[in-house]
Image (cartoon, rainbow, N blue to C red):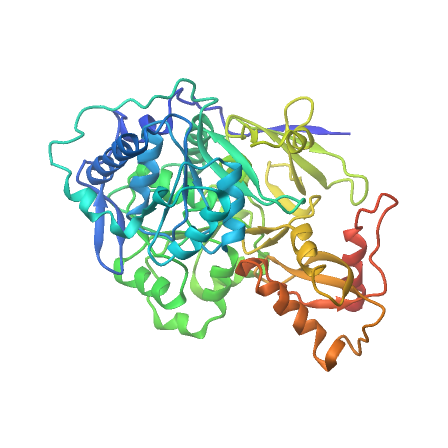
Amino acid sequence: MATISVSPFFDVEIPSTDLWSFLFERSDRPYPLSHPLFVDPLSNRSLSFQQIRQRALHFGHHLQSKWSWQPGDVLVVFAPNAIDLPPLIWGTLAIGGVVCPVNPSYRAEELRHPLIDAAAKAIVTTTAQAPIVYEAIDRAGLSRDRVILLDQLDPLWATIKDTDYVAPHRPPIQNPEKDLSFLVYSSGTTGLPKGVMLSHRNMVANMVQSAVAEQGQLVWNQDRILGILPFFHIYGIGFLLNYTVYTGVPMYVLPRFQFPSFCDTIQRHRITYAYVVPPVILELVSNAATKNYDLSSLRMVVSAAAPLAVDLIHAAKQKLGLVVRQAYGMSECAPAVHFQTWSEAHTHPGSVGRLIPNMTAKYHPIHDGDNKEKELWVKGPNVFLGYLNNPTANKESFSEDGYYKTGDVGYEDEAGNFYITDRVKELIKYNGFQVAPAELEGIVLGHPAVKDVGVVGVKSGLAGSELPRAYVVVKGDVVVKGDVVGKGGEGLEREIVEFVEKRVIGYKRLRGGVRFVESIPRNPSGKILRRELKKLEREAKL
């Protein structure tokens, strides 16, 4: 029997406005126009609220004058983290456009799908990534003159006068509940990423909801946040981009996580707060060089996007004096669903927190397993509108009474703390990125020695993520000895791993390796029984 749970927090009022107006036209902004919001610690450049607002509106005007940009037109963003990127994102929103951020590590064929599916009107990238973009847009049928190079926009910014864009700006958003702000592509079990349609209200709501869990602990003129989360990921969009402007707490932006620059930035700039993923905490705990840095200013870390082992939480506290809060969410919820308060980080390690305000959860029974553990379904103002051009997925993902089926399994304790224990969905989660088994299976089947294949995720240890592993049935004329020697006397396992590596982005690689089996377990309709494949891993450890 399904059970209903409501947020333990009082409901909060969600402003009926668009994202631009909520962030940039508010009357209650707690910090001055000149306050720096985004800082590049490597170059010491920074952008203030006023500079960001002016650049954003100037860029929006540029899109309108150059390409007659209309409300609903889509700008794809294919670039690594940089403080120059946020104005382009908000400038697109300011004129009613939709922003579609894509992983800048994608190969051309992977980039092609969102370009076509989203009907992109233009794409932002860097000079270094331009060759991949040109290859992708040629395949997608987009004109090459629709490429905007982020690192060549200085002449555009130079035309801005101090007196420009001082008047209030009202975006052409007619219905914040239905008009799209972001289109974020999330992997599905079919292998093709699905476009998650997030409205302006979805994004505004999640900021207001998440602020309740923060309990006023972040102060704009006292705290400093380190930002390493990718701007293309919903975690980064929600908490590095939008939440920074909302709170006014300066964000020190690094292009990616690298241990030396991460620790050095904390030490030099006295960083007080950071949003991370579990592998970062693992690195801090396990790397002997951590002791060479003064990280004492760091008073709190938020970990999300993947499960975090309780042992690792305790190790961070014992070895580094580091307190870790957990949160849980997904692209489809813009992103937060559960969030620990600061005090709950101390009292409930291992939980992802309690349901944020204005949300309702339904715990739906699953057919096997402990009765205490059920699938989480959610409903709230932050839940997305649906998947773009995918009515089948929409029908499968929502219940008849409007709940989104997360596919995650867990239980809620008496105090409302949620604990994730498993996933119903087949997606493999590697360091916060979603990997579709079917996509990898399709690639592996292209290897001449492979007859059949099933891909599952296997646990990777304290980091709390899974490693994609392929279980392979070889063709009859292939001899496999000890899972190592294959056709031509070469290592077939290594050969298949490298075969996949050449065709996918880094996080989709077969880091769990290849195992050879006599058959792939399937049900009568031909669907792979992935739970049976996972049993092989458990049995091998006995």
Quarter containing the N terminus: top right
User: Would you place residue 188 above or below residue 536 in this image?
Assistant: above
Q: How many numbered marks, from 0 up?
A: 0
Question: Among all residues in the image, which is located at the extreme bottom?
Answer: 489
Left or right for 71, reference 518: left
Residue 416: x and y in percent read: 60, 36
Compared across the picture, whether 435 is left or right of 116 comes to right
Residue 200 in the image, given as x and y percentages of width and height: 42, 27
Q: In this view, does 320 lie above or below 426?
A: below
Q: Is residue 486 visible?
A: no
Residue at 18% in and 24% down: 167
Q: Which of 127 and 339 is in front in this view?
A: 127
In which quadrant of the rendered view does residue 494 lie?
bottom right
Residue 285 lies, in percent from the top left, at: 48, 66
Q: Is residue 200 visible?
A: yes
Residue nearer the viewer, 528 or 289: 528
Q: In this view, does 385 lie above or below 335?
A: above
Q: Look at the picture and state if 377 lies above or below 40.
A: above
- Identify the image quadrant of the C terminus: bottom right
**Rendering quarter of residue 466:** bottom right
